[in-house]
Image (tube, helix red, strand yellow):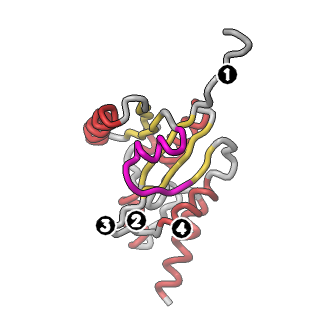
């Protein structure tokens, strides 16, 4: 490699609803942060979808949970993921896989993205086995029933949801 070769920064986008972020998400994110120069974890705004937490709170909770990851940044966006990836200069999309059904859906999405944006690659990272069953929807259900979720989400999310339940209960 010549001295005048300038290597391009490898930027990856990890998009999702993260409603709320789970330990499985953080597992995937932590491993992605070792593979890329920068990772942007971005909360997708679904204007038609009823969310458990609003976008601002999801972003805030993620920022708190990743404060020790120096090359990870948090944002939110709407529209097509590949269009947002282009805007931030990301050439890679990170997608976490837990189950076979995740794989089927994600491959279909990946192939669609390849047609729309052939210069952006998708990287699939399987969650560690201890996180395979964790999903945001399970966490929401358990939280709504005041069940301990501390094994499934970061500590700051547990505290936020417990405080939120206390406010609603008053």
Q: CA distance from mark 4 to mark 3?
A: 18 Å
Residue 48: which disc? 3
34 to 18, vertically: above or below: above
Element under disc 1: loop
Crowding at dot 2, Cα within 10 Å, few <14 / some 14-19 / many 20+, comes out as some
* Residue 83 magenta-highlighted: yes
**Does residue 100 appear anywhere in the picture?**
no
Q: Which mark is residue 31?
A: none
* Residue receiving disc 4: 57
Q: Residue placed farthest to the front in the image?
A: 4
Disc 1 marks which residue?
6
Q: Residue at x 49, y 33 (%)?
A: 91
Question: Mark 2 or mark 1: which comes first in sequence?
Answer: 1
Describe the element under mark 3 as helix, strand or loop.
Answer: loop
Mark 1 neighbour density, 10 Å: few (under 14) some (14–19) many (20 or more):
few
- Between circles 4 and 3, the one closer to the viewer is 3
Kindly identify which residue carries mark 2: 140
Q: CA distance from mark 1 to mark 3?
A: 43 Å
Q: Choose the circle earlier in sequence order: 4 or 2.
A: 4
Magenta residues (range): 75-89
Label 2 near label 3: C-beta < 8 Å?
no
Gap in angstroms between the C-alphas marked 2 and 1: 46 Å
Neighbor class of circle 3 (other Cα within 10 Å; few <14, some 14-19, many 20+) is few
Q: Nearer the viewer, residue 61 or 74?
A: 74
Q: Position of residue 56 (x, y in %)?
A: 53, 67
């Amino acid at each position: 490699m010549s001295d005048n070769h300038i290597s391009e920064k490898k930027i990856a986008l990890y998009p999702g609803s993260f409603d709320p972020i789970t330990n499985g998400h953080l597992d995937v994110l932590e491993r992605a942060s070792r593979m890329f120069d920068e990772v942007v974890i971005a909360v997708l705004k679904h204007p038609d979808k009823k969310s458990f937490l609003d976008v601002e709170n999801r972003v805030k909770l993620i920022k708190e949970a990743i404060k020790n990851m120096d090359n990870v940044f948090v944002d939110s966006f709407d529209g097509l993921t590949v269009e947002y990836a282009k805007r931030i200069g990301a050439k890679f999309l990170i997608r976490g896989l837990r189950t076979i059904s995740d794989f089927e859906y994600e491959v279909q999405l990946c192939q669609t993205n390849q047609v729309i944006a052939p210069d952006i690659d998708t990287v699939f990272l399987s969650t560690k086995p201890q996180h395979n069953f964790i999903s945001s929807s399970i966490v929401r259900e358990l939280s709504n029933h005041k069940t301990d979720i501390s094994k499934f989400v970061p500590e700051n999310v547990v505290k936020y949801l417990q405080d939120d339940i206390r406010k609603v209960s008053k």
